[in-house]
Image (cartoon, grey):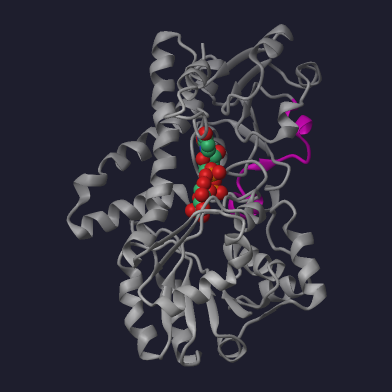
């Protein structure tokens, strides 16, 4: 099939390449000319394992190309995926729908009658119903098909998703989308066919549940800290109950990124508009527990420096919001780095992939080209993003360069016994 993908950020670039992998002819469209030029040259403007090679392969074969014209997309294809971002509005909880409205607004002017427009962006419930009439007026049909890919696993999650959710009013349009996904559906993964509001809600409900799981275990970490219990053992033990499961129960610095934080806030804002704010008011607690973990990490660093960070040197290992990503949006690691700096510490940051983004957005922090250099003369080392590189750091090598052997493990993946045996003062969130 011929299809277009409007918006070639994280979601769109991956989706476009994955659709080419399924055998389709794909045109990716974005308003950002620099981004389009890089993608057209087979380069990916962000870090995602395997994506650059995957995308370059399909650009080279001619199955995937990129441009800046929605009019061209309208002529090229009768199936269009809208993958633009819905960031949090500045100073508000609500989602900013500027890009979604602009993408659909332009598309409806250029699509042919009978075209199918597929919304993949994460939107407040009710958006699809609002957009559908303009799409119908253009003689086209709308389908809502939320995306569940994780950064770091983007290709895998797109080609082998846990489920496909399709919200549609129009049978023919729904079948067109099923045809596009036929090779994926043929593998037997569940397909949930539903209406617009349910499809939109599935996405925010899933992210809210994931955020709740993380904050639940982090709330337990707070209780563990007050009682001398160990949250990692607690998580393992409750996770053995198959009704609870052991995934997304890693206690630590909590969630960040461009999705979970803004999605739970946008959900609260939308629920307020719908008059059901009480139903999701617990998400406020989820958000607060999450933010408290950042403050607690700064407290631990300060406790290790005898009660004051003023004039101390702090090494921060990690800047990305999670490993295998260079995304620093709402990064807990950088939040902690800034907070320690505000308390008077000299902070040096190292991250295997996110240094460029971090330097651009946080120019007041200092950066080092290696983990060891970031730790040179440090009074305390903060391990804040669990890259595998940090797990393999040798406590002895680090001990040789730091001023004081103090380390806070914000992600509970380092082995306390090993670090303590090498003479380190080791603290971790939720652990004795
Ligand atoms: C999240 C969802 O997992 C995806 O399903 C969804 O498609 C995506 O948002 C989206 O809405 O686009 P992502 O933001 O890539 O994906 O990251 P996650 O892997 O969910 O991790 C989010 C944050 O939670 C990270 O900061 C991670 O370090 C943290 N986390 C995760 C924990 O603190 N503990 C855990 O046990 C798991």
Where 72 falls versus 377 (above or below)? below
> Which image quadrant for residue 13?
bottom right
Residue found at x 42% / y 52%: 262
| In this picture, residue 127 sits left or right of residue 79 | left
Q: Picture coordinates of residue 417 (x, y %)? A: 67, 10
Residue found at x 40% / y 22%: 220
Q: Picture coordinates of residue 61 (x, y %)? A: 81, 75
Q: How many numbered circles are shown? A: 0
Residue 343 part of the magenta segment: no
Magenta stretch bounds: 357-376
Q: Picture coordinates of residue 186 (x, y %)? A: 60, 60
Residue 368 part of the magenta segment: yes
| In this picture, residue 68 sits left or right of residue 331 | right
> Which image quadrant for residue 389?
top right
| In this picture, residue 266 sits left or right of residue 386 | left
Q: Picture coordinates of residue 315 (x, y %)? A: 66, 30
Q: Is residue 257 visible?
A: no
Residue found at x 78% / y 21%: 394
């Amino acid at each position: 099939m011929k299809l277009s993908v409007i918006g070639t950020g994280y979601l769109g670039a991956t989706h476009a390449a994955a659709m080419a992998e399924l055998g389709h002819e794909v045109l990716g469209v974005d308003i950002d000319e620099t981004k389009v030029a890089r993608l057209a040259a087979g380069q990916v403007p962000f870090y995602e394992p395997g994506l650059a090679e995957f995308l370059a392969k399909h650009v080279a074969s001619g199955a995937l190309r990129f441009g800046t014209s929605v009019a061209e997309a309208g002529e090229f294809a009768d199936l269009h995926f809208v993958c633009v971002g819905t960031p949090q509005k500045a100073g508000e909880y609500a989602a900013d729908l500027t890009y979604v409205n602009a993408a659909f607004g332009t598309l409806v002017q250029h699509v042919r009658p009978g075209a199918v427009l597929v919304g993949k962006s994460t939107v407040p419930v009710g958006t699809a119903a609002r957009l559908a009439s303009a799409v119908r007026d253009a003689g086209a049909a709308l389908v809502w098909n939320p995306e569940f890919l994780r950064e770091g696993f983007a290709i895998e999650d797109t080609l082998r998703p846990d489920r496909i959710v399709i919200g549609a009013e129009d049978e023919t349009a729904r079948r067109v989308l099923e045809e596009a996904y036929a090779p994926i559906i043929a593998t037997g993964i569940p397909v949930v066919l539903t209406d617009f509001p349910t499809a939109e809600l599935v996405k925010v409900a899933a992210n809210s549940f994931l955020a709740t799981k993380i904050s639940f275990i982090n709330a337990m970490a707070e209780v563990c800290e007050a009682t001398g219990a160990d949250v990692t053992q607690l998580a393992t033990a409750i996770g053995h109950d198959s009704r609870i499961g052991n995934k997304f129960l890693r206690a630590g610095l909590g969630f960040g990124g461009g999705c979970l934080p803004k999605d739970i806030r946008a959900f609260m804002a939308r629920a307020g508009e719908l008059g059901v704010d009480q139903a999701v008011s617990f998400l406020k607690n989820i958000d607060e527990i999450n933010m408290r973990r950042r403050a607690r990490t700064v407290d631990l660093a300060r406790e290790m420096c005898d009660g004051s960070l003023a004039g101390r040197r702090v090494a921060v290992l990690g800047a990305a919001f999670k490993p295998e990503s260079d995304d620093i949006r709402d990064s807990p690691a950088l939040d902690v780095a800034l907070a320690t700096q505000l308390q008077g510490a000299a902070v040096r940051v190292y991250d295997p992939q996110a240094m460029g983004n971090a330097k651009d957005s946080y120019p007041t922090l200092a950066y080092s080209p290696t983990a060891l250099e970031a730790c040179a003369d440090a009074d305390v080392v903060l391990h804040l993003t669990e890259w595998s590189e940090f797990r393999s750091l040798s406590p002895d090598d680090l001990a040789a360069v730091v001023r004081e052997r103090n380390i806070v493990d914000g992600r509970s993946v380092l082995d306390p016994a090993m670090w303590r045996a090498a003479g380190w003062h080791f603290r971790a969130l939720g652990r004795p």
